[in-house]
Amino acid sequence: MSVTLQKIVSLAKRRGFVFQSSEIYGGLRSAYDFGPMGVELKRNLMDEWWRSMVHSREDIVGLDASIFMHPKVWQSSGHLSSFSDPLVDCLVCGERFRADKAPRLAPGADAPIELADKGRAKAMLEKLQGHGESQLERRGKILHGAKAGERGYVCPTCGAPLLSEERQFNLMFRTFMGPVDPIGKVIETVRAAIEGGAGEAAIRERAEAALDESTLYLRPETAQAMFVQFSNVVQAMSPKIPFGIAQIGKSFRNEVTVEHFVFRSVEFEQMEMEYFVPPGEGPKYLEYWKNERLGWWQSVGLKAQNLRFRRHDQGELAHYSDGCFDVDYHFPWGWDELEGIASRTDYDLKAHAAGSGKKLDYFDPQATDPATGKAGWRYVPHVVEPAAGATRGTLALLVDAYHEEAAGQTGKGERTVLRLHPRLAPIKAAVLPLVKKDGMPEKAREIVEALLEAGVNANFDQQHSIGKRYARHDEVGTPFCLTVDGQTRDDDTVTIRYRDDRRQQRIPTGEAVAVVQEALRC
Ligand code: GAP
């Protein structure tokens, strides 16, 4: 049975994985909150990443940088000038959209415009004809006669080719630090500029300049901190090249198009690592990291057939990159990016060295300087960066794990189950007293306490019938349910039920912790 995004969104809300931000106030379109199950799943994913990147390797260290950075960081990195999307307004329905993502027609092709209903189509026809679009005619709620322009693209909502000019829209969120009144400053500056007879462009420039002193940006990627702190890390840790600096943290982008639930949101969590290598070794390590990363996504449970690489074309490469692969995942709407693995050359370290006036290089006493042929080589390292999304990764885990099983011949057994990797599951073991009497709840609590003490996230659950409890835990992906029943008092055993095949087995109560721990090790 195919998984639709709607089913994932519904399960996510019903079972406490993801909620719309500020829902009781109507929600914020592009922001989400991870609920009690979602926060566990996302943290487990991030812990796995940290374990594989930092704790299980000697060549990578961690960093936890602040979200606010000096505004010059974004100037040097190129984000202020180039981190933008081409934005266009539809002159018919008012939709604002990204030109590079809009549907395209052949230039000059018919472009029917679809309005919500006949009344609106009639009113719009009159308005457009009044603006010189006399070739248009109406059939029902559709206006015919418009042609796609040279740019080819049309409005994704109504199909109109009647569009504004493209504007570059910077994706960084801007805010202000300190006890300033930015609005007051702008009013003052604009008033003076108007009195001085300045034109619109000059007024805007002066207003921007008035805000500059206090402007800060919410970081759009975690990566820049690793470049800016490069020297401090080298001095503090004396790492031997090649080495990496890893970070997990929030990033923010004022995305023009927010789409597919948490896939593209304005606030999201990234897991990024900058791997510093000698000049000329970028391609070798790009190949190495691309394979490592694909393997890692499989190790956290994503199926191999739902993952693939996509090489970026030359024209698609970011301003800092000379080679890039995406790890794509097969989401319900098709293949889309889960992680980018880029060769960033020496662009960032050189840009920050130029911007700050501080040297950002590395001295290798054992290497031979190719220019002089002598021992000892000082150079600006090149960088290979695996940059993954934890928010997007959590969505991929939910999609991959989601299964609906039809009822058996008896009509029983229909269920929805999340087949999450046991290490990623929010709850590892649920302990269920069959009934709320005969000492069963007390025994179940003892087992929960033993599991918690052993570091296993366990859950005591005595609400509703045993069948409903199994169903609930199947839906949140709990791999093991331990049931305390009448026999427990007689022979000190419990039933362990395995989520994936619903197999049940009796085990001694004293072995419950070890059995669960062993299963989690795989
Ligand atoms: N430092 C490089 C960098 O940030 P990116 O491809 O723009 O590269 C890396 O982002 C990853 O961050 C993406 O593969 C994706 O998983 C995640 N990501 C980027 N924008 C996102 C958004 N608006 N919402 C959710 N995740 C996003």
Image: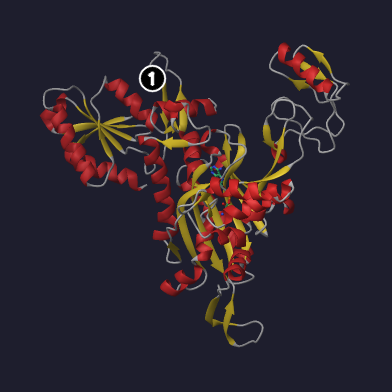
Q: By what rule are the colours in the image chosen?
A: secondary structure
- Would you place residue 207 above or below residue 258 in this image? below
x and y percentages locating residue 338 in the rendered image: 56, 44
Q: What residue sits right under mark 1 in the picture?
A: 413
Left or right side of 273 for 437 = left
Q: Circle 1: is it few (<14), some (14-19), or many (20+) Cα within 10 Å?
A: some
Does residue 10 appear in this view?
A: yes
Depth check: 521 or 373 in front? 373
x and y percentages locating residue 56 in the rendered image: 40, 60
Cβ of disc 1 within 8 Å of ligand 1? no
Left or right side of 469 for 53 = right
Image quarter of residue 278: bottom right
Image quarter of residue 145: top right
- Would you place residue 102 above or below residue 138 in this image? below
Disc 1 marks a residue whose amino acid type is Gly
Depth check: 206 or 166 in front? 206
Q: Residue at x 51, y 39 (%)?
A: 396
Left or right side of 169 for 477 = left
x and y percentages locating residue 188 in the rendered image: 59, 48
Q: Secondary structure at mark 1?
A: loop
